[in-house]
Image (cartoon, grey):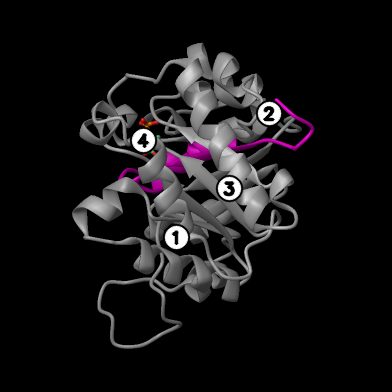
């Protein structure tokens, strides 16, 4: 890992009731001063309560998605401003489950990422290839194309994080070879550096079946600056093991 301070972000997806906030308290007690930034993104219903549960500790709280608009007639949606108002500091945009389940394309993801910056949230922009795209040898084309189409105007290393998440590795227990993660992250580093003055210090996360047992090896890759973690972020013991590896 480079000198960039890593970020370990957890995505609770559509999991978690208020009782699960004891996991945040346990995490904070076990890791009061981690060597990385820590972000947890619970369902929107828990953002405010998690902010309260995490107060005074190292865990920041974020959303899993936002609408591009600030407010309006968008039943069921949450704006970036609402996440900020609830105490959130970041939001995931373009997760493959949103791209697949809600038909979100790169232009939509870019608009959401720009909404995040408008609300002073850090945008965690997800990119990643499907298994069919990998098998067809199209991984770099797909990932770099998504990056180019999804990166918000005004992106800097401080306000934007890129998460590389191969779709076929999410929730499957399968992880790419270290050489494959290295290849994609090197290409992402070059792309953000070419595009942004400070792209050399933008955080590039790996996501997809990260566990305490594989985190250290993945985080040791030069252009991997932490992880985006789904299933293993739900329990303090597992997430803490990943934080300890960063
Ligand atoms: C994710 O949902 O972003 C993710 C990486 O999930 P998992 O860690 O469970 O593969």
Compute the Cα span from label 4 to label 1: 16 Å
The residue singled out by tag 2 in the image is: 31
Q: Secondary structure at mark 1?
A: helix
Q: Secondary structure at mark 2?
A: loop
Which residue position holds label 3? 191
User: Is residue 179 found inside the magenta-colored segment of the image?
Assistant: no
Is residue 207 shown above or below 83? above
In magenta segment, residue 23: yes
Can residue 178 be spotted in the picture? yes
| 193 and 64: which is toward the camera | 193
Question: Disc 2 vs disc 4: which is toward the camera?
Answer: 4
Task: Look at the numbered discs 4 and 1 and tell me whether their residues touch, using CB distance below 8 Å.
Answer: no
Q: CA distance from mark 3 to mark 2?
A: 34 Å
Measured as percent of width and height from the top left, residue 99 is found at 28, 54
Left or right? Give the position of 190 relative to 126: right
**Which callout, 3 or 1, points at the residue further toward the start of the chain?**
1
Residue named by callout 4: 139
Q: Is residue 42 above or below residue 207?
A: below
Residue depth check, mark 1 versus mark 2: number of the one nearer the observer: 1
- What residue sits right under mark 1 in the picture? 150
For the residue carrying disc 1, how many other residues have a C-alpha within 10 Å: few (<14), some (14-19), or many (20+)? Answer: many
Q: Which label's residue is closer to the chain start, 2 or 4?
A: 2
Taking the spot 61% from the left edge, 27% from the top edge, the residue there is 243
Q: Residue at x 51, y 27 (%)?
A: 183
């Amino acid at each position: 890992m480079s000198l960039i301070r890593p970020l370990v972000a957890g995505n609770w997806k559509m999991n978690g009731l208020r009782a699960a906030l004891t996991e945040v308290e346990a995490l904070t007690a076990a890791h009061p001063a981690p060597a990385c930034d820590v972000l947890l993104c619970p369902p929107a219903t828990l953002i405010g309560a998690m902010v309260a549960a995490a107060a005074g500790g190292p865990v920041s709280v974020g959303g899993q998605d936002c609408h591009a608009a600030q407010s309006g007639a968008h039943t069921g949606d949450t704006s970036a401003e609402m996440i900020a108002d609830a105490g959130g500091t970041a939001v995931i945009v373009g997760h493959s489950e949103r791209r697949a389940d809600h038909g979100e394309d790169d232009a939509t993801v870019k608009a959401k990422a720009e909404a995040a910056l408008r609300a002073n949230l850090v945008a965690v922009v997800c990119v990643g290839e499907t298994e069919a795209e990998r098998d067809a040898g199209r991984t770099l084309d797909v990932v770099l194309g998504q990056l180019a189409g999804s990166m918000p105007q005004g992106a800097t290393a401080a306000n934007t994080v890129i998460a590389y998440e191969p779709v076929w590795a999410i929730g499957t227990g399968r992880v790419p070879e270290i050489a494959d993660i290295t290849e994609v992250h090197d290409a992402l580093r070059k792309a953000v550096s070419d595009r942004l003055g400070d792209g050399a210090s933008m955080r590039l996360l790996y996501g997809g079946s990260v566990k305490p047992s594989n985190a250290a090896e993945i985080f040791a890759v030069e252009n991997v600056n932490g992880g985006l973690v789904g299933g293993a972020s739900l329990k303090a013991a597992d997430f803490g093991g990943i934080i300890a590896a960063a």
